[in-house]
């Protein structure tokens, strides 16, 4: 952390700002870093070249802070790893950039195809087997190379770029968020009146500049076949066909972790989907929990995040029909119930969750990182760190209690 005196590693890197909405809202910016001389190990992580520096959102103009505990992403990813799912490895650091102290950040792995990250088969233009691997995201659009050469002031207000879906960067679901067939053309202008009905899948791997027409057709058809099966299966019978297309256990775990964390960005934004070669579609890894937990109050404590559409009506990015439909299936709900009961008896017990929060808070407090961070970033907002940690713990206890009661009725 910041009070470390000895130089332990020196590596040349490239660095850039990161984030879309978070970049615009927060005075405490996030960064992408890439090592310039090949793969490097930091903090004992497997060697790679792409990493993220993610801080909490601090808006000094309007005087608000998301995640006063500094730990939402960290503990969410720790939970996912504890139940056997890959999530970005994380290390708390204090960042000094160009001689300016910037506070507490989480140094984390970029989600990408790699043997130690999203471990799927490579897929290039010459691949004869086009069944995988693919990484898709449901998310806002990244400006990418179109932003090269633009001044930083452009990125302060480039809201339209978030919704600039094109045939090059994405494909659209055939169905609305309610499971009806769409009856208007894809790729409308950003924030058009019917955008809230659409779900787009962005090409994460292979990237849009590398994915072939045949690969695009394959993965779009695969998603369409899954969606159609999910919509048309008779849940009053014992027969399921949608399970031919998805790794159900990954969907169950993704649901449970994001619901426990009340991650209001899950499912509809910051959402990763992976299809390995000759395997089924899997959900995850989990990502981006900075407006979850006790900050995720767009969703009541006693409701599922997947019911987002019942609470929010004017968001361009709404909840895809997948999740409410899955929760109509007694077989899926039974899988959720068994998994939750097992996790609550061990990995996600109250004792383990409280211990995780306490140990993380103690780490940040004992070496003075909390005090130094808020000396930089409080500026009249009025942060009581101990109270924030207590509120997070109370949230987790209340959320797990509600989930246990509700799932017990499945």
Image: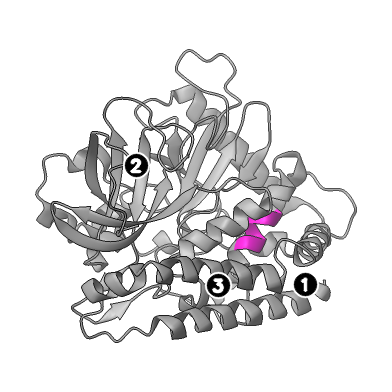
Residue 335 badge: none
Q: Earlier in the sequence, mark 2 or mark 3?
A: 2
| Residue 14 locus on image (x, y percent) | 23, 37
Residue 342 relative to residue 78: left or right: right
| Residue at the far front in the pictured view | 6
For disc 3, the neighbor class at 10 Å (few under 14, some 14 to 19, many from 20) is: some
Taking 405 as reference, is 148 above or below it? above
**Any magenta on residue 253?**
yes
Q: Which residues are magenta?
A: 252-257
| Residue 276 locus on image (x, y percent) | 61, 31
Q: Which residue is mark 1?
A: 407
Q: Which residue is mark 2?
A: 166
| Residue 41 locus on image (x, y percent) | 41, 34
Q: Which residue occupies the foreground of this view, 140 or 276? A: 276
Taking 295 as reference, is 117 above or below it? above
Query: Can you tell which of label 1 and label 3 is closer to the viewer?
Result: 3
Q: CA distance from mark 1 to mark 3?
A: 27 Å
Secondary element type, mark 3: helix
For disc 1, the neighbor class at 10 Å (few under 14, some 14 to 19, many from 20) is: some
Q: Residue at x 65, y 54 (%)?
A: 82
Instruction: Say whether marks 1 and 2 touch (CB < 8 Å).
Output: no
| Residue 257 locus on image (x, y percent) | 62, 61
**Any magenta on residue 45?**
no
Q: Which residue is mark 3?
A: 358
Q: Quadrant of residue 219?
A: top right
């Amino acid at each position: 952390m910041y009070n470390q005196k000895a130089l332990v590693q020196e590596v040349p890197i490239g660095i850039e700002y990161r984030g879309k909405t978070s970049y615009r809202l927060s005075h405490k910016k996030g960064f992408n870093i890439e090592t310039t001389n090949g793969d490097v190990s930091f903090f004992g992580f497997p060697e790679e070249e792409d990493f993220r520096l993610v801080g909490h959102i601090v808006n000094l103009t309007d005087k608000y802070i998301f995640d006063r505990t500094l730990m939402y992403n960290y503990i969410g990813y720790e939970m996912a790893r504890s139940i056997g799912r890959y999530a970005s490895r994380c290390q708390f650091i204090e960042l000094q950039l160009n001689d300016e102290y910037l506070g507490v950040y989480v140094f984390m792995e970029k989600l990408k195809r790699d043997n130690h990250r999203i471990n799927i088969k490579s897929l290039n233009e010459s691949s004869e087997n086009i069944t995988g691997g693919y990484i898709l995201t449901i998310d806002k659009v990244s400006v990418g190379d179109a932003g090269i050469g633009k001044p930083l002031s452009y990125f302060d207000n480039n809201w339209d770029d978030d919704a600039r879906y094109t045939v090059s960067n994405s494909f659209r679901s055939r169905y609305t968020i309610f499971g009806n067939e769409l009856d208007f053309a894809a790729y409308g202008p950003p924030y058009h009146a019917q955008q809230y009905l659409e779900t787009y899948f962005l090409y994460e791997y292979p990237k849009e500049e590398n994915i072939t027409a045949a690969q695009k057709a394959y993965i779009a058809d695969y998603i369409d076949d899954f969606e159609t099966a999910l919509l048309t299966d008779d849940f009053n019978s014992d027969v399921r066909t949608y399970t031919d297309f998805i790794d159900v256990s990954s969907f169950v775990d993704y649901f449970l972790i994001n619901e426990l964390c009340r991650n209001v960005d899950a499912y509809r934004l910051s959402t990763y989907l992976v299809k390995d070669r000759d395997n089924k579609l899997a959900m995850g890894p989990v990502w981006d929990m900075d407006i979850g937990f006790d900050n995720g109050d767009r969703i009541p404590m006693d409701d599922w995040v997947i019911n987002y559409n019942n609470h929010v009506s004017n968001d361009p990015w709404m909840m895809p029909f997948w999740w409410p439909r899955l929760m109509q299936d007694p077989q899926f709900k039974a899988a959720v119930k068994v998994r939750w009961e097992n996790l609550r008896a061990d990995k996600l017990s109250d004792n383990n969750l409280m211990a995780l929060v306490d140990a993380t808070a103690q780490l940040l407090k004992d070496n003075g990182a909390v005090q130094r961070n808020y000396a930089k970033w409080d500026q009249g907002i009025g942060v009581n760190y101990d109270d924030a940690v207590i509120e997070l713990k109370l949230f987790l206890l209340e959320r797990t209690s509600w989930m246990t009661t509700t799932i017990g009725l499945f």
